[in-house]
Image: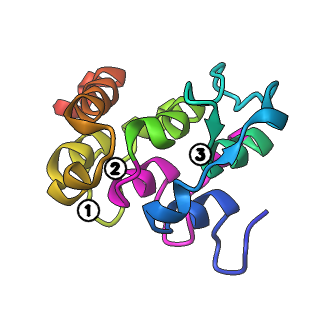
């Protein structure tokens, strides 16, 4: 469901601070949750807000925000770590890697690689973001052309 400004619950959540997004709920009652990506909740026994929203409506990962930005782009520009939900958004809408961000005109892999603030804020460390950049680029190598 969209708000009057065109945002969905997922795009609203992705536009919030990492502190809000990283608030995790105990997963005891989520044991059989399907986040639409064939993945189980995080290995640490917790599920984050992004996973909850994707489990409710996986297709929301392909619905842009009111300003035209896809959820994958929002996750990247707001510094959400690859293993904190960005990976889940990507898996729910892999075609998003081929769509340029309307604000920066960059592909998602470019955003992941170019924003030092995002890289600095990532709790996944270098390997998590290197994996993100590689995965996003490998999904559509023609984005380099």
**Marked residue nearer the N-terminal end (1 or 3):** 3
Horizontally, residue 86 falls left or right of residue 66, namely: left
Q: Disc 3 designates what residue?
A: 62
Q: Which residues are magenta?
A: 58-80
Q: Residue 37's spot in the image, x, y percent?
A: 64, 25
Q: Is residue 38 left or right of residue 143?
A: right
Tags 1 and 3 touching, CB below 8 Å:
no
The stretch drawn in magenta includes residue 16: no
Numbered disc total: 3
Question: Residue at horizontal 26%, vertical 62%?
Answer: 104
- The dot on residue 104 is 1
Q: Which residue extends farthest bottom?
A: 4
Measured in 3D between alpha carbons, the distance from the residue under mark 1 to the one under mark 2, in whole angstroms, is 8 Å
Check if residue 76 falls in the magenta segment: yes
Q: Please, is residue 95 above or below residue 11 in the view?
A: above
Contact between labelled residues 2 and 1, with CB atoms less than 8 Å apart: yes
**Residue under circle 2?**
100
The disc, 2 or 3, on the residue closer to the chain's N-terminal end is 3
């Amino acid at each position: 469901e969209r708000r009057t400004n065109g945002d969905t619950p997922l795009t609203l959540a992705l536009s919030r601070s990492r502190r809000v997004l990283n608030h995790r709920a105990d997963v005891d009652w989520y044991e059989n949750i399907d986040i639409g990506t064939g993945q189980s909740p995080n290995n640490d026994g917790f599920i984050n807000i992004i996973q909850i929203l994707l489990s409710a409506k996986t297709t929301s990962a392909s619905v842009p925000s009111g300003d035209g930005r896809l959820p994958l782009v929002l996750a990247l520009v707001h510094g959400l770590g690859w293993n904190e939900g960005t990976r889940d958004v990507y898996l729910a809408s892999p075609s998003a890697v081929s769509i340029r961000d309307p604000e920066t005109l960059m592909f998602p892999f470019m955003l992941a690689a170019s924003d030092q603030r995002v890289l600095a804020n990532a709790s996944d460390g270098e390997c998590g973001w290197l994996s993100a950049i590689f995965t996003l680029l490998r999904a559509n190598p023609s984005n380099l052309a």
